[in-house]
Amino acid sequence: MSLTQLDQFLSLRESNPLLAERLASPLELEDFLQLAREWGFQLTESDVLDAQKRAMDHGSSSSLQRIQAEESRRLRNFIH
């Protein structure tokens, strides 16, 4: 689909408490895509990856550092 479709899907949580509740906790990618399908959006893995890239491209340096720190902690936990 597109980033526009993904943005539309995510904006629904503002007006729908049930969807907001489902999106409040982390979801596996497949679960997220299935949830989107349940709401009538045919999103793909590429859409999600493009949205992540867009967020990284538009993020502040402090938010990018925070994201990198979280990623490195996960990697350390995986290695040990």
Image (cartoon, rainbow, N blue to C red):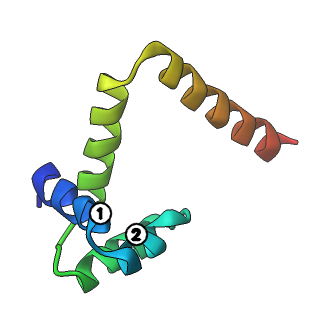
Marks 2 and 1 close (CB-CB < 8 Å): yes
In the figure, 78 relative to 38: above or below?
above
Give the secondary structure at mark 2.
helix
- Image quarter (top left, top right, bottom left or bottom right) of the C terminus: top right
Residue 20 tag number: 2
Q: Which of 25 and 56 is in front in this view?
A: 25
Query: What residue did someone put label 1 on?
Result: 14
Q: Is residue 24 left or right of residue 49?
A: right
Q: Nearer the viewer, residue 45 or 3?
A: 3
- Image quarter (top left, top right, bottom left or bottom right) of the N terminus: bottom left
Give the secondary structure at mark 1.
helix
Q: Nearer the viewer, residue 46 or 2?
A: 2
Q: Where residue 59 appears, x then y in whole percent?
A: 37, 24
Q: Where residue 60 appears, x then y in whole percent?
A: 41, 18
Q: Which of marks 2 and 1 is nearer the N terminus?
A: 1
Q: Residue placed at 16% from the left, 50% from the top?
A: 3
For badge 2, the amino acid type reads Ala
Q: Residue placed at 77% from the left, 46% from the top?
A: 78
